[in-house]
Image: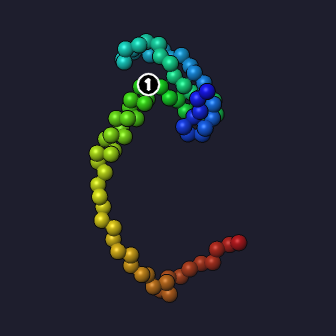
Amino acid sequence: MMTCTRCQGLMLEEQMIDMEGGYGEMWSRSWRCFNCGHRDDAVLQHHRQLDAKRVAGNLLTVPAHEATDLPWESEEVEPLAA
């Protein structure tokens, strides 16, 4: 039994047809979450891996700025409702 990566719900196996046949097989297996509808198949996994590599390669180190103390006396603060 497979569980959903988003909501931990039950994943159901489905047969899907690729009308364009772009990645080889015309019929493919896919998994769909019964709870949230999240899909998981080979094509989606491939694209997620490509996106993850692209994002990981674009990460930049940003220097942290020193914290500055703000004078709270100069700002008006409204009380929060209970």
Which residue sits furthest bottom? 73
Residue under the point 56% across and 19% down = 14
Residue under the point 39% across and 79% down = 68
**Quarter containing the C terminus:** bottom right
Colour mapping: rainbow
Q: Which residue is mark 1?
A: 42
Q: How dense is the environment of label 1, judged by Cα within 10 Å: few (below 14), some, or many (20 and up)? A: few
Residue 44 percent location from the top left of the image: 43, 29
Q: Is residue 61 left or right of residue 69?
A: left
Q: What's the amino acid at mark 1?
A: Ala
Which residue sits furthest front? 1
Q: Is residue 63 left or right of residue 34?
A: left
User: Residue 61's quadrant in the figure?
Assistant: bottom left
Secondary structure beneath dot 1 equals helix
Residue 16 percent location from the top left of the image: 51, 17
Residue under the point 31% across and 51% down = 59
Residue under the point 40% across and 35% down = 48
